[in-house]
Amino acid sequence: MSLSGNRLTVFQATWKCLWRCGVRTTTLPLAAAVAASTAVAGESPTGGGLGACLNSLKQASPEISCEYTALLTDQERADLRRLTRDRLQDAVCRVSVRIDRSLVRPALSEPNHVFIAPPQPVACAITTKDSTFDVTGTFAPRVTIKDGKATYATPGLSGVTGVSKVLSWPVVQYVNYSPGIRRDMIAIINAYRALITQK
């Protein structure tokens, strides 16, 4: 496999982790309970955790604020190693969420609303067979609520650094416009909105 082919495969595998870590967490203010049940497989034992993000939702502070480290499952790690011929060994992502609570309230209570999160940073340390390198980016999810249901959602991935634009551009387009990713975001948000209206 050529170096450019290797980098592309490693990058694609990296964004699988980045997608899981970033999008689910930045959707967290709208879908905390559901996100907890479908959250990333592992958390670092140090520094916060997904539980800290869920607890942040319950607090009365003006800002929803948390950080957590997301790890791949053993199966995902094995798949990535197999798919990259052992060139990619692991990916660990650190996600930061800082969203003003006043931005979230209308998205949870109004029947018609457009929620746009400010950019939320995510950084992944990618371990290859020979080295470790960092890939960073931001997610700024946008969700349209119509008649009480989420009808449109996009992760808003941008600002990717650590790899060339030639490699990042197609992945950014895929993450932001993939029907499957959008469908998952909409399902999580609608499930959470339904859960909170039952209370």
Image (spheres, helix red, strand yellow):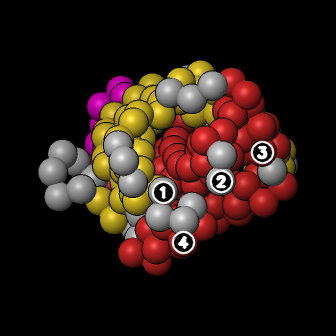
- The span shown in magenta is 58-64
Mark linked to residue 82:
4
Can you tell which quarter of the image residue 189 is in?
bottom right
Q: Which residue is mark 1?
A: 87
Image marks 2 and 1: residues in contact by CB distance under 8 Å: yes
- Mark nearest the camera among 2 and 4 is 2
Q: Which residue is mark 3?
A: 174
Where is residue 162 shown, x and y percent of the image?
A: 50, 27
Where is residue 106 shown, x and y percent of the image?
A: 62, 35
Residue at 63% from the left image edge and 61% from the top image edge: 188
Q: Could you say which is closer to the camera, residue 186 or residue 74?
A: 74
SS label for mark 4: helix
Q: Earlier in the sequence, mark 1 or mark 4?
A: 4
- Mark nearest the camera among 2 and 1 is 2
SS label for mark 2: loop
Q: Which residue is mark 2?
A: 1
Q: Earlier in the sequence, mark 2 or mark 4?
A: 2
Image marks 3 and 1: residues in contact by CB distance under 8 Å: no
Q: Earlier in the sequence, mark 2 or mark 3?
A: 2
Amino acid type at image mark 4: Arg
Amino acid type at image mark 3: Tyr
